[in-house]
Amino acid sequence: MNKEIKRQRNLLKGLSNETKKKKRFFFFLKKKSFYIPAIVFFVILVAGGVVGAKTYPIVQAILSDVNNAKNNLTEGQNLLVGQNFSEGREKIQSAEMDLNSAQDKFSTISWIRYIPIARTQYTAADNVFKSLDHLTNGIFGLIDVAESVLTPLQESTSSSIATISSEERIQILQALTEAESALENVQEEFDTAIDYINKIPNNGLLRVVKEGIEPLKESAPKLQNTISQIVPLAKSLPSFVGYPSQKNYLLLFQNNTELRPTGGFIGTYGIIKMRDGDILSLTSDNVYNLDEAAKKNGLNITPPEPLYQYNAVQQWFLRDSNWSPDFPTSAQKALEMYSLENGQEKNLGGVIAIDPTFIQSLLKITGAITISGVTFNEENFVQKLQEHVSQGYKTQGLETSERKDIIGDLGSVLMDEIFKLPKVRWQELFITIEKNLAEKHALLWMNDPNFQSVLASQNWDGHIIQDTSRNDFGIVDANLASLKTDPAVTRTTNYQLTELENGNIQVHVIRTYENTGKLNWKTTRYRTYARMYVPLGSSIVSSSGAMIDCKKEGGQVTTANDLSHTVYSLFLCIEPGETKSFEITYILPESLSVVRSDPSTFNIFFTKQPGTPGDTLSIEVEFKKRITAIEPTIDTTQQISDTHVLLQDTLNRDKTYRFSL
C-alpha cells in the first residue's frame, strides 16, 4: 500500500497548477461536510482497483466466517426446538466463535470507513456484527431459562404433561416464575438486535454485501416476533394455570356458525378450575338452563335496542352478553350476568372464550375423539355437534336441558388428550394456540391487571384499540335469528380511500354478503345487524342498502359513538341464493388528513371480527402524492399509477397497511 501511495503522490505532483486550483476549490466546498485529503480523493477514483485488491481476500474470509455462523445458528435453533439444549448450546457457541473471528478480521480493515465509497459497506457490516452479538446473547439467555424450567422434564422419564408428577409440575412453574427478569433481559437483547438491523443502510450496498445481509433482515424480525410472544406468555403462564394459588374461570363456548360481535352465540358456558398447572375440573351447561331459571326468579334487564328491535329479545341474559365487539367489555358483562343469574361459582378470575374453529384445530393435533358413541374429528366436528344438539340427543334418551352436555364431556376428553401429547409435539401445540389467539378464535380476559396488560399487549384479549389518532376500520356482524347460516355466508369488503382536493380523506365502503345456503333446519335467510367502526369524528356523506326488515328496503344508517369510535349501524337481510351489499361514504376527521399526518406515511388499521374465518378485503387508495412503498408487501398489489394502488388480502387477523408517500 505504501508503494501505491507514493506512486499516487508522484502523479499528483505532475498535475497542472490550474487543476490544483480547481481541486482546492472543490475541497473548500466540501469542508462543511467532511475533510477529504487529496490522497484519499485519488484513492476514491481507483477504489475498485486499489481498495478492492487489498481488502477482497479479507472480505471473503469474513463472509466465510459469517456464513459458518449462520449455519451453526440455524442448526442450534433446530436443536433447541427439539429441546436438545446441550448440543444446541454448543452450536450457538460455535456460531459465536465464528462471529468473533469475523469481527477480528473486520477490525483490520476499519480504515475503509474513511473512504466514502466504502463507508456504506462498513456501516452495514458494523451493524450486522452488533446485531448478531445481541442475538446470540439473547439466545444464550433463552437457553439458560429453558434449561432451568425444563430440567425436571429432562431428568424425568415422563414424556408428556399428563405423566409429570405434581412435584415436577410445581418445580417447573416455580422456575418459570423466578425467570421473569431473565426473560425480560432476553426480550431486551432481541429488541436491541433489531434496532441495529434497522440501522443497516437500504441503499448503496454492494451486491455481495446485500445478499449476505438479506437473510438476517428477513429472519431476525420473525425470531423477535416469536420471542415477543413467548416471553409474555411464559411470564404469565404460572399465574394463569393456578400457581401459586388456584384460579377459576368462566368459560364461554361461542358458536361462530351463529356469529355475534365477539365470535358467536353463547350457547354453552362452563367453569374451569386450575391449580399448579393441573385442571381440577371442567364443567359445562346449556346456557338456557341458567337463563331460564333467572327469568323465573324475576331477573329483568333491558337488552340493547337492536336485539329488541330486530330479534324480539325482551330481556337481557348471559347468552346475549357479548353484544360489545370489545371482548374485555363483553367479558365483564358476562361475569356480571353470571352473578346476577345466581351462577354457583363466586370466585372467578377471568373469562375464556373459544369457538368451534379453535376446537377443530386441537382435534387436528389429537386425532379423532369418541363421546357417547359420536366420533368427532377435525373435518366433521361442527356438523356432528350441530346434529347432536339439534336432533341426535333424542335418540340417546336425553332431555332438552341435557342436549349440550356432550360439549363439556368433549372438552374434558380433549384436554386429557392434549396433556398426553409427547414433548416433541409441544411446539406444534404452542403454534396452534398462538394462531387461534391471533385470529381471535380464542379470547382471554383476566381481572389481574398485570396479567391483563400482557394479554392486551399481544391483543389476545380481543380489545378494540381506543386511539382517536388512528385511522381504524372494522365491521362487526350480529346474526339475529338466522339459525347456523354463517358458514354459508361469504363476506367481501371493498375499502376505497381517496385524498380530496382540500387535503381531506374520503372513504367509500362496499360491504357484500353472498348467502350460498338453502332453507333447511340449519340455514335460512341471513339477518345481520352490522356496525362499522371508523375514526371518531368521521362525517357520513351518503349511504345505501340498509333495510327496515327482510321484506322492506329503505332502512336508515344510524350514527353513534362507541369505544372512542364513530359507529355506523344498519340492518340487512339476504335470502338464500341472494347477494346484497350496503355502501357508506364518509370523510375522515381533519386530524387524519394527509396534510396533517406524518408527511411520509399514511396508515390504515383493519380490525378482524372474532370468530370469522377471514373475509376478503379489497383496498384501493389514491393520494395526491406519489406512493413510494407499501407495507406489508402483498402479491396481489396492482400499481394503477404513481399515486393510485389496488390490493387484495384476507382479513384473517388484525392488519395494518402503511403507505409511504
Image (cartoon, rainbow, N blue to C red):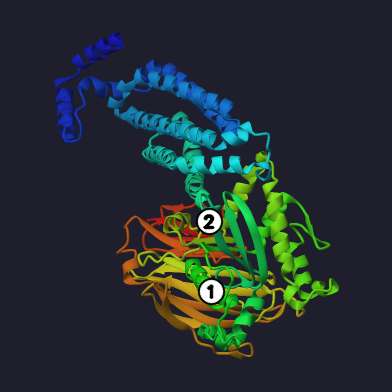
Circle 2: residue type: Thr
> Residue 128's spot in the image, x, y percent?
41, 32
| Quadrant of the drawing holding the N terminus | top left
In the rendered structure, find residue 339 and report the number of the disc placed on it: 1
> Residue 53's spot in the image, x, y percent?
40, 16
Instruction: Say which of 651 and 30 sits in front.
Output: 651
Residue tagged 2: 637
Circle 1: residue type: Ser
> Residue 616's spot in the image, x, y percent?
59, 64
Instruction: Say which of 343 and 491 sits in front.
Output: 343
Looking at the image, is mark 2 or mark 1 earlier in the sequence? 1
Instruction: Say which of 38 and 337 sits in front.
Output: 337
- The residue at the point 48 percent across, 39 percent down is 220
Instruction: Say which of 439 and 595 sits in front.
Output: 439
In the rendered structure, find residue 435 and report the number of the disc placed on it: none
> Residue 548's spot in the image, x, y percent?
57, 89
- The residue at the point 56 percent across, 85 percent down is 315
Distance between the Cα atoms at labels 2 and 1? 50 Å
Q: Secondary structure at mark 1?
A: helix
